[in-house]
Amino acid sequence: ERIQSMNIVIVGGGKIGFSIAQELALENHDVIVVEKDPERAAFIEDTIDVMSVCGNGAVIDVQRRAGVPDADLMIAVTAGDELNQLACMIARKLGCQNTIARVRDREYSMQLHELKDELRLSMAINPEQLAAREIFKLLQFPAFVKRDTFAEGKAEIVELEVTEGSPLDGLRLMDMYSKIRVRALVCVVVRNGEAVIPDGNFLLSAGDRIYVTAPATELVRLTHELRLRNKKSKNVIVVGGGRIAEYLIPMLLRSGTRVKVIEKNRQRCIYLDEYAPDADVICSDGSSQSVLKLHNIAAMDAVVPLTNMDEENILIAMFARKIGVPQVLTKLNRVEYGEMLCDRDADSVISPKLLSSHTIVSYVRAMENTEGSAVMTIRKLAGGKAEAQEFAVTDATKNLGVPLMDLKLKSGILIACIHHGGKVIIPGGHDMLQSGDTVVLVTTAGRSLLDLNDIFGRE
């Protein structure tokens, strides 16, 4: 149960606006969506538990009607960067202290850092840049389907699949350290579509998808001990030269990766060739299997389908898998399509929409300060079936200095790691919480916590 709900206005009811509104409504916030298209506004109000106002969100009267002067937060996520920035400036003028704008254009993004104060933005969100960073992170560790970072980048929760013959197949979790000698903790197991938080007696088996917490410095050792593919992808084909590719290509080139980009639009190819001369830009239809074969897809370490059509991306991904490309990272707008891919194999699905909405919901959760400890970071795991939350430990936290073995936690909650004095601790029974630490908790869906003290059961 939420201790505090906020008044939040979202300008723009497209895919990202809808997704953010849906998540915030589930968190019991009072949400109003401003949408220009009357049919879309009516659809939003009928589909999720929010109110809608029909109109242009960059007009003062419309913002007043939507209650922006009294709102705790205004989020502008229309298709237009300029409109979003203008909407935020008007909101601040009307007295709303917290504003977030979606800014997608690369040139705008580059100058935002300098203009943030003048525009009085609390935060700028760039879905394509978020997606590019996510793809880049995954290409550094090909064995992982997903990576989430905590503790100022010092701890990670990674997703991987238990395969037949793996050191994890048939392993009882209490024996994990003695077998693989890496400081790591299995915090969630997905089996037959169900997510569970396992105890030490849990027996892993082939086909399980597991989420493992480990210090970032241990990831290379973890891949080595588990006999996973641990060399980063050096030869990559990117299909589709849109905005995500524009952010991703320089990251890959700087890391020494060889990049082929296949893009249909000739003008876009000319632009990309000038923008990234070290990439091999090919003007052709990357959804064609014969084109992919011609450009030696079978010899690639990774294929990244980034076209604007989900169906094309899925077909490219399935073909790449079929011919044995080791790593396939697929961009999808409609997340439900992702289940189709992931049911087949351990493919990674990248959703700019979800990355954006999760980032904004994390920001909102961090605003919900109470006397105790605020949520600093929040990540969805196992397709939303579980959640990892990072809290600050303060003097108001109960049971400081008590060994974890002596604590009674509510069911469905696991302490995954403790960040103490710059060091990441994968906790054992003798470890304890101390003021100044941060702690990552993993909970099953529906057990979202607002305060760190909510984890403790009654004595």
Image (tube, rainbow, N blue to C red):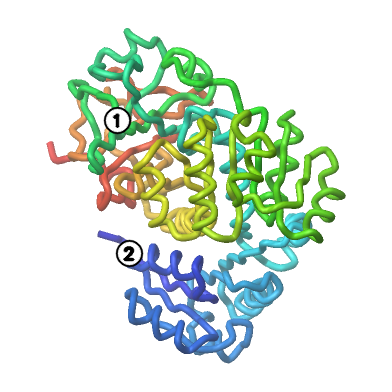
Label 1 SS? loop
Mark toward the start of the polypeptide (1 vs 2)? 2
Q: Quadrant of the C terminus?
A: top left
The x, y position of residue 394, in whole percent, is: 40, 39
Residue type indicated by callout 1: Gly
Label 1 – label 2 distance at C-alpha: 31 Å
**Would residue 367 be visible to someone looking at this image?**
no
Q: Is residue 169 left or right of residue 436?
A: left
Residue at left offset 40%, top offset 78%: 44
Residue at left offset 71%, top offset 31%: 257
Residue type indicated by callout 2: Leu
The x, y position of residue 389, in whole percent, is: 39, 43
Residue at left offset 42%, top offset 41%: 390
The x, y position of residue 218, in whole percent, is: 50, 19
Q: Nearer the viewer, residue 314 or 410?
A: 314
Give the number of the disc on residue 207.
Answer: 1
Name the residue that disc number 2 marks. 26
Q: Residues within 10 Å of mark 2 (few under 14, many from 20)?
A: few
Farthest-out residue, bottom = 61
Residue at left offset 57%, top offset 69%: 77
